[in-house]
Image: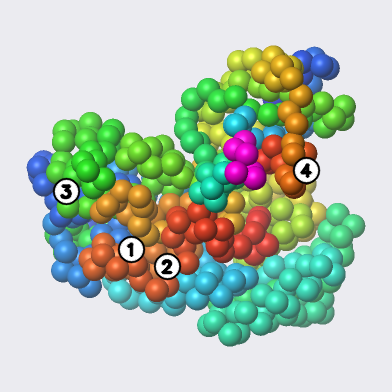
Amino acid sequence: MPFSLLKYGLNKDYPFEQNADLPAPSALKSHYDVVIIGGGGHGVATAYYLAKYHGITNVAVLEKGYLGGGNTARNTAVIRSNYLTSEGVKFYSESVKLFQGLSNEFDFNIMYSRRGQLTLAHSDAAVRGFRQRTEVNKHFGGKTELIDPQQIRELVPTLNMNPADQPVLAGLWHIDGATARHDAVAWGYAKGATQRGVELHQLTEVTGVNVEHGKVTGVETNRGKIRCGCVVQAVAGMSSVVAAMAGIRMPITTYPLQAMVTQPVKPFLDPLVSSPALHCYVQQTGRGELVFGGGSDPYPLYSTRSTMDLKESLLAHAVELFPFMANLRLMRQWGGLTDMTSDYSPIMGLSPVDNYYLDAGWGTWGFKSTPICGKTMAGLVATGKVPELIEPFAMSRFDTFRQVNEMGATAASH
Amino acid sequence: MKIINCPLNGPRNSSEFVHGGELREMPDPNNCTDREWADYVFYSDNQIGVITEWWLHAPSGYWFIAERHTGSDEILRTYDPSEIFTKRVEFSAKAESSQSEEITA
């Protein structure tokens, strides 16, 4: 063992840096320029960019639980931009670029790891869809290629090429596909935001939103009333519930999504592998554990419990893809809440209430958009103008039937 | 596996059932505004509490109504749609299809 490690082990002040990362909670002030509801990745990212690029630091991030303890901690940490629409690819490509620089920017390791993501086609229709996605990606900034079974075998020698009697015909090879430690992303943003003067209030639940003459004036919390200039709602999994406090009805239905992780094994799987037809995606973490997740639960529910039938079918499909996984033991299994929109795209931007901004509808694609969503939402809050990148994702698109259809590029393949 | 009490077939495994979405009143497709139609098709209360919703028992092709709590997943009551729909719902010729009353998730 290196002596320096021993020195740290015996030093009672270590880890000193982490202790100083988040200032102790202070009393709530009676007024903030910006109140952000939700202390997950998106909420603290918005606060961070408000402080960093726009000099707005009279900001409170209100979190009912603890920092990054909601769906930020429940996703499977996939980063990719191989979507289907030009709007989607442009948006998520920017996010991938920002992710690549985050560790340096934070001076804090988010364990970003570019692996490439491989999506499998088991039918001619899927191959056609992949062709389209490849071309759209090339045009709008993603790095994606269509590859054949031989190339797939070389990339992932352990993959069963005929899972569940559905032969693998081709692969969508997304070179930018990556993973990162989701907690660390929230911690890094929170650290950067609080260092610049933003207040993060954990165990502070918003219980009401005050709206006067169509304009938000403040929020009520379990720790008292706060007046504010504007509100950003970033509460994945509870978007409809919180929006209803401001009298806003949303085009969202909330479903649980379940995932699991196995015991750690030696590194054997570099890319993230996903099979939309089998509703299963698998990746190996830096620690060697296999993380896998599947499709959403079959009916809406606000509960993060696991169900035997969903776990069973997910396991069956994972074992089809990687048969030796049958010998592994599960370490953890869990569920998260996904706010699904009917077009599988998020809702960002203005709401029917003035100065109340929505960051919602993040279904199963929230983590991968954390940096760019924070950056564009901060731009919106600071200038009052909707950044061009998120214009297509306004909630009003549902009223005018201008959806951004990402269903084919999203369902069970995040 | 979760058991759902089908009003026609009795208690069955939940895997035999398909969720059909919340029960809601359809605006007249020929006369409503686009905003009203969008609200009916896309928007939802989506709150935590007891909701009334459609379910299909797939093997027997039987649609029924359930009252379920969206927080606890407890099904309080299931019953035949005739309790709510006392007469047949007619659609005018211009409506797209007789099934448009159902919005599946």
**Residue A162 found in image quarter:** bottom right
Nearer-the-camera pick, A127 or B65: B65
Name the secondary structure under disc 2: helix
Which chain is disc 4 placed on? B
Where does residue A279 sit, x and y in percent of width and height? Answer: 71, 53
**Residue A175 found in image quarter:** bottom right
Where does residue A94 sit, x and y in percent of width and height? Answer: 44, 75
B30 is within the stretch colored magenta: yes
Which chain is disc 2 placed on? A
Q: Which mark is residue B93?
A: 4
Residue that carries the numbered disc 2 in the rendered image: A390
Q: Are marks 4 and 2 on the same chain?
A: no
Q: Are marks 4 and 1 on the same chain?
A: no
Q: Which mark is residue A405?
A: none
Q: Are marks 2 and 3 on the same chain?
A: yes
Q: CA distance from mark 4 to mark 2?
A: 40 Å
A280 is within the stretch colored magenta: no
Circle 1: residue type: Met
Disc 3 crowd rating (10 Å Cα; few below 14, some 14-19, many 20+) is: many
Disc 2 crowd rating (10 Å Cα; few below 14, some 14-19, many 20+) is: many
Which chain is disc 3 placed on? A
Q: Are marks 3 and 1 on the same chain?
A: yes
Circle 2: residue type: Ile
Q: Magenta stretch?
A: B26-31
